[in-house]
Image: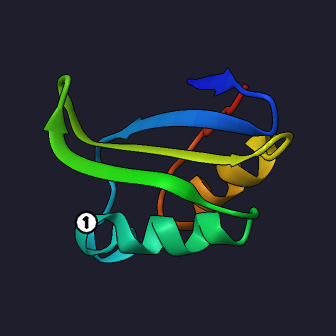
């Protein structure tokens, strides 16, 4: 899910079934991949939220949803669709 801001989009990503080595401790591999999409701010990562294995929250510059989807796939996500 993403919310629109003036210059940034706020994202909430929930996942399960990712290989721990690909996701990284506390989502560090995901965070590093997301940095390639532009300025990454307001990063938050939690395990065992809302029936999912993990939840990441962050903001990225406007128009980066496709890049965010690719970043999630690069750490083990499948059939990712960011809208």
Residue at the spot 60% in from the left edge and 39% down from the top edge: 79
**Quadrant in the rendering for residue 66:** top right
The secondary element bearing badge 1 is classed as helix
- The x, y position of residue 15, in whole percent, is 36, 41
**Quadrant in the rendering for residue 18:** bottom left
- The x, y position of residue 47, in whole percent, is 17, 47
Q: Nearer the viewer, residue 32 or 43?
A: 43
Residue at the spot 30% in from the left edge and 52% down from the top edge: 45
Residue 6 left/right relative to 68: right
User: Where 49 sits versus 47, above or below?
Assistant: above
Q: Nearer the viewer, residue 54 or 9?
A: 9
Within 10 Å of disc 1 (Cα), the crowding (few <14, some 14-19, many 20+) is some
Question: How is the structure coloured here?
Answer: rainbow
For the C terminus, the image quarter is: top right
Q: Which residue is mark 1?
A: 26
Q: Residue furthest right?
A: 63
User: Where 41 sits versus 17, above or below?
Assistant: below
User: Where 48 sits versus 76, above or below?
Assistant: above
Residue at the spot 59% in from the left edge and 56% down from the top edge: 73
Q: Residue furthest front?
A: 6
Residue 53 left/right relative to 74: left
**Quadrant in the rendering for residue 81:** top right
- The x, y position of residue 21, in whole percent, is 30, 77
For the N terminus, the image quarter is: top right
Q: How many marks?
A: 1
Residue at the spot 22% in from the left edge and 47% down from the top edge: 46
Q: Nearer the viewer, residue 51 or 5?
A: 5
Residue 61 left/right relative to 26: right
Q: Residue furthest left?
A: 48
């Amino acid at each position: 899910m993403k919310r629109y801001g003036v210059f940034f989009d706020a994202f909430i990503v929930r996942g399960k079934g990712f290989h721990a080595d690909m996701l990284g401790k506390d989502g560090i591999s995901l965070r590093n991949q997301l940095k390639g999409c532009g300025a990454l701010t307001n990063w938050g990562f939690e395990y065992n939220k809302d029936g999912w294995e993990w939840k990441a929250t962050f903001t990225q510059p406007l128009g980066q949803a496709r890049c965010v989807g690719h970043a999630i796939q690069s750490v083990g996500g499948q059939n990712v669709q960011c809208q």
